[in-house]
Amino acid sequence: MNLIEKATILHYHRYRIEQFRHGTVEALGWRSADSQRLRFQTLMKVGNLNGAKILDIGCGYGDLKAFLDLHFPDFEYTGIDQMPEFIAEARKRYDGYARTNFFQTDFITAELPPVDYVIASGVLGYRCKNENFYTDMIGKLYHSAGIALAFNMLNKSRFPQHDLLIGHNREEILVFCRALSPRVECFNDYLEDDFTVLMYRNAMNDQRNSGTEFR
């Protein structure tokens, strides 16, 4: 993804902050809190996250952290996002929370830490002229996950034409994921134009890595 494409994304979210108010799910690009929640519920099918180290890619205001707190009493959470406004708000919301960290960084170029689970909601939906960008990023995120990667994408067959956002061919994405992972699951029954992919490192899913430092 080139600098112009990244700048376009920043401009898009700053426009939505002005339009919908800072701190709202609409400023993040979601249609509603319900659509965000349905995505989170589907991503959580990846496994029991209690006691896990979790990396949230494109964390926004840290809404996933709040959702996880409702379901798991013990986990380590790290969120990253390239938007300084989002990270500043997330740090304000979760100031003083144990084992909770936010970093302003570009996941495309950053060296990601090894964790148990990587979760990416929405970050693979932006247009990019480089056709290999999406599979390259899936591979990078999967490499960082000791147990599993969970991500969602817009479904090309149902998502309308958009200047900034783009849908993907679900079957082509699954073929790529299955070439990397011994176990891949897919869900497309929660929203009309979205699908979620779960990629596991091994059949038993009991491997745990550690570390949360960015370089």
Image (cartoon, rainbow, N blue to C red):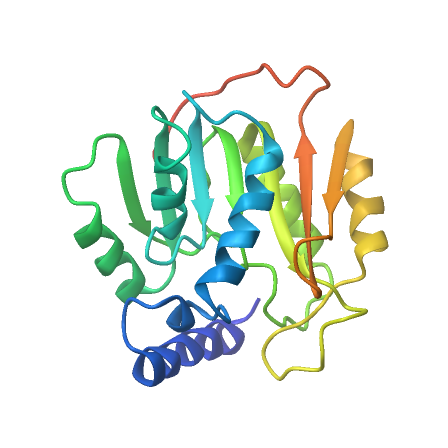
Using the rendered image of the protein, determine whether residue 149 is visible from the camera's viewpoint: yes
Q: Quadrant of residue 125?
A: bottom right
Give the residue drawn at x 26%, y 54%.
Answer: 90
Identify the residue at the far left of this view.
96
Q: Can you say whether 14 is above or below 53 in the image?
A: below
Where is residue 43 drawn, in percent x and y? 57, 43
* Image quadrant occupied by the N terminus: bottom right
Where is residue 9 drawn, in percent x and y? 47, 74
Give the residue drawn at x 47%, y 68%.
Answer: 32
In-front residue for pair 201/21? 21
Give the residue drawn at x 43%, y 56%.
Answer: 106
In-front residue for pair 27/213? 27
Using the rendered image of the protein, determine whether residue 137 is visible from the camera's viewpoint: no
Q: Quadrant of residue 19?
A: bottom left
Give the residue drawn at x 78%, y 52%.
Answer: 173
Q: Can you say whether 157 is above or below 202 in the image?
A: below
* Image quadrant occupied by the C terminus: top left
Where is residue 174 drawn, in percent x and y? 80, 46
